[in-house]
């Protein structure tokens, strides 16, 4: 069986103040992009710091490609961009990357070739000879990404990698990460920028108050809660119970067309035209419902659906839950 890129079992860090993260068990496959989401103070950085060997767990265990976290073997396989990065401001960008290359025991000739490539890749190719003190925050974050990539890591840990970037910078970094993913690099992404997780990651976990509340495939999590709207004519109330019974789904009359527009109800002068609403799991269910509507002699005028955005999912997942994920 192929070894996982990241395997954490019951990983726990208890700070003396009782905070930290508790009992985190996840497995990330090779080449996978995994998103770790959570509100401020949820414990995301704590978890990543344990995985990269910066702090010791209180309990539990974890491996990186089969090597115990904190070991030299594990460290040699990873790249890490910390959330609170700060580089030696008296050095130039090139010198900062060279320092990291030396810490990785990279040959000088290899570093000579790699440094300009990295500066180019992260979009600061022309500023490599400027001192870090003259860099903007966004440029420093790009420099941090170059440092994290210096050893061409198999597993890349990124803690809020776009926090200092403008929208164009975020898109550029996302494209760098997409290319790394295509190349087979495993990416572990801590982010508040939920869009980044949505666009880049295959699976994700939601951490709140130190514990995982939910995890799963990003696509499944989003698709599960797709709200579909059907504008139908020739409707009469008894057809609603027939549709519910026949389909086994929860279908209701809607006062919206699915586009956040609230409609006067009924939606037409002709009371027989209405919008129906249903939460469906996939397009097959929608097709089936269409067929049932038509089978009953109703006219289908319009169909629309709105996927729940990750933001909405995130808010509904953390609001009103206590640290064990129970409704308060
Ligand atoms: N060294 C420490 N000693 C004591 N408590 C700590 C320490 N580091 C973090 N904490 C606490 O542990 C909890 C988790 O912090 P952590 O930085 O891991 O969260 P986070 O999810 O990364 O948050 P953010 O998104 O705000 O960076 C917080 O309540 C924080 O105050």
Image (cartoon, rainbow, N blue to C red):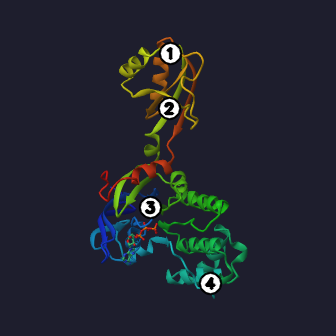
Q: Mark 4 falls on what kind of element?
A: helix
Please state which of the two labelled residues, at mark 1 or mark 4, is closer to the viewer.
Answer: 1
Whole-angstrom CA distance, mark 4 to mark 2, is: 55 Å
The residue carrying mark 2 is: 228
Q: Which of marks 2 and 4 precedes in the sequence? A: 4
The residue carrying mark 3 is: 39
Please state which of the two labelled residues, at mark 4 or mark 3, is closer to the viewer.
Answer: 3
Whole-angstrom CA distance, mark 3 to mark 1, is: 45 Å
Quadrant where the N terminus sits is bottom left
Given residues 8 and 271, the one toward you in this image is 271
Rate crowding at label 3 as few (under 14), some (14 to 19) or many (20 or more) other CA atoms within 10 Å. Answer: some
Whole-angstrom CA distance, mark 4 to mark 3, is: 35 Å
Disc 2 and disc 3 in contact, CB within 8 angstroms:
no
User: How many labels were placed on the picture?
Assistant: 4
Rate crowding at label 4 as few (under 14), some (14 to 19) or many (20 or more) other CA atoms within 10 Å. Answer: some
Is the residue marked 3 within 8 Å of ligand 1, measured from its CB? Answer: yes
Q: Which mark is residue 48?
A: none
Q: Residue furthest top?
A: 297
Is the residue marked 4 within 8 Å of ligand 1, measured from its CB? Answer: no
Residue 53: x, y in percent?
Answer: 38, 76
Residue 19: x, y in percent?
Answer: 33, 71
Q: Which of marks 1 and 3 precedes in the sequence? A: 3
The residue carrying mark 4 is: 95
Image: 89 above or below 36: below
The residue carrying mark 1 is: 235
Displayed-image quarter of ligand 1: bottom left
Given residues 78 and 320, the one toward you in this image is 320
Q: Which of marks 3 and 2 precedes in the sequence? A: 3
Q: Mark 3 falls on what kind of element?
A: loop
Q: Residue at x 52, y 73 (%)?
A: 151
């Amino acid at each position: 069986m192929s070894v996982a890129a990241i395997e954490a079992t019951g990983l726990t860090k208890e700070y003396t103040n009782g905070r930290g993260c508790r009992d985190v068990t996840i497995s990330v496959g090779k080449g996978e992009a995994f998103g770790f989401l959570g509100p401020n103070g949820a414990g995301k950085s704590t978890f990543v710091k344990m995985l990269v060997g910066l702090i010791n767990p209180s309990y539990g265990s974890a491996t990186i490609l089969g090597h115990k976290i904190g070991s030299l073997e594990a460290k040699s396989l990873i790249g890490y961009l910390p959330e609170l990065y700060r580089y030696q401001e008296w050095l130039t960008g090139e010198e900062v990357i060279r320092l990291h290359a030396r810490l990785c025991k990279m040959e000088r000739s290899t570093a000579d070739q790699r440094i300009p490539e990295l500066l180019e890749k992260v979009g600061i190719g022309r500023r490599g000879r400027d001192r870090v003190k003259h860099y903007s925050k966004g440029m420093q974050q790009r420099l941090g990404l170059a440092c994290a990539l210096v050893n061409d890591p198999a597993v890349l840990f990124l803690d809020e990698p776009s926090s200092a970037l403008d929208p164009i910078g975020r898109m550029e970094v996302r494209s760098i990460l997409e290319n790394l993913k295509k190349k087979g690099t495993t990416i572990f992404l801590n982010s508040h920028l939920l869009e980044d997780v949505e666009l880049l990651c295959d699976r994700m976990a939601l951490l709140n108050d130190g514990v995982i509340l939910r995890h799963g495939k990003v696509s499944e999590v989003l698709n599960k809660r797709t709200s579909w709207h059907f504008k139908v004519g020739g409707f009469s109330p008894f057809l609603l119970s027939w549709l519910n019974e026949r389909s086994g789904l929860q279908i209701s009359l809607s006062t919206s067309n699915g586009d956040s527009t609230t409609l006067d109800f009924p939606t037409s002068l002709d009371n027989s035209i209405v919008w129906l609403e249903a939460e469906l799991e996939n397009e097959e269910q929608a097709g089936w419902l269409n067929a049932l509507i038509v089978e009953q002699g109703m006219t289908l005028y319009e169909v629309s659906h709105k996927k729940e955005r990750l933001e909405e999912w995130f808010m509904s997942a953390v609001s009103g839950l206590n640290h064990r994920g129970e409704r308060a």
